Image (tube, helix red, strand yellow):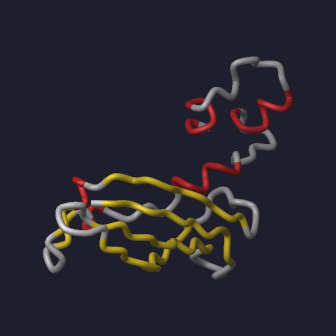
């Protein structure tokens, strides 16, 4: 609900199209919330073995593919995988791409796939 309120749902408190995302009765999750799920944790902010400080990176692209509805009251698990690393040349840094496969922690059902690119 907080995500939906934060992006403007509930502005019209009697609009049933908005209420389904901000009111407990028949609550649904707004699909683009998928991009916030299972984001890499604090331990990935510095990668000593690479010399990169993830706090000094720029997030340049994000997309998602929903495979199933995002469930309520379930534990979701993300599995990150680097899908590409591109050298931009001397003093220009690198660009890398990754996927985050989100699935239900109990059943293993695939929920969504997040794709992102960042540069440092």
User: Residue at position x 37%, y 77% from top?
Assistant: 85
Instruction: Give the camera-side residue of 75 and 11.
Output: 11
Percent of width and height locating residue 76: 56, 68
Position of 19 relative to 27 (above/below):
above
Q: Considering only vertical position in the picture, is 104 above or below 58?
A: below
Examine the rendered structure and indicate whether residue 40 appears above or below residue 22. below
Furthest toward the front, the residue is 89
The picture places residue 7, in percent across and down from the top left corner, at 60, 32
In the foreground, 48 or 74: 48
Residue drawn at (72%, 33%) of the image: 23
Would residue 12 appear left or right of 63 to someone viewing this image?
Answer: right
Question: Residue at the spot x=28%, y=55% of the render?
Answer: 57
Q: Quadrant of residue 54?
A: bottom left
The N terminus - image quarter: top right
Q: Quadrant of residue 25?
A: top right
Image quadrant for the C terminus?
Answer: bottom left
Q: Residue 33 location in percent, x, y?
A: 61, 49
């Amino acid at each position: 609900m907080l995500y939906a309120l934060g992006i403007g749902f509930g502005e019209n408190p009697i609009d049933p199209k908005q209420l389904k995302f901000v009111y407990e009765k028949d609550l649904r999750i707004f699909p683009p919330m998928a991009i916030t799920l299972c984001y890499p944790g604090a331990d990935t902010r510095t990668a000593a073995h690479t010399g990169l400080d993830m706090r000094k990176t720029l997030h340049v692209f994000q997309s998602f593919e929903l495979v199933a509805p995002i469930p309520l009251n379930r534990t979701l698990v993300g599995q990150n995988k680097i899908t590409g690393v591109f050298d931009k040349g001397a003093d220009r840094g690198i660009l890398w791409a990754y996927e985050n496969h989100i699935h239900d922690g109990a059943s293993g059902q695939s929920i969504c796939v997040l794709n992102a690119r960042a540069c440092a």
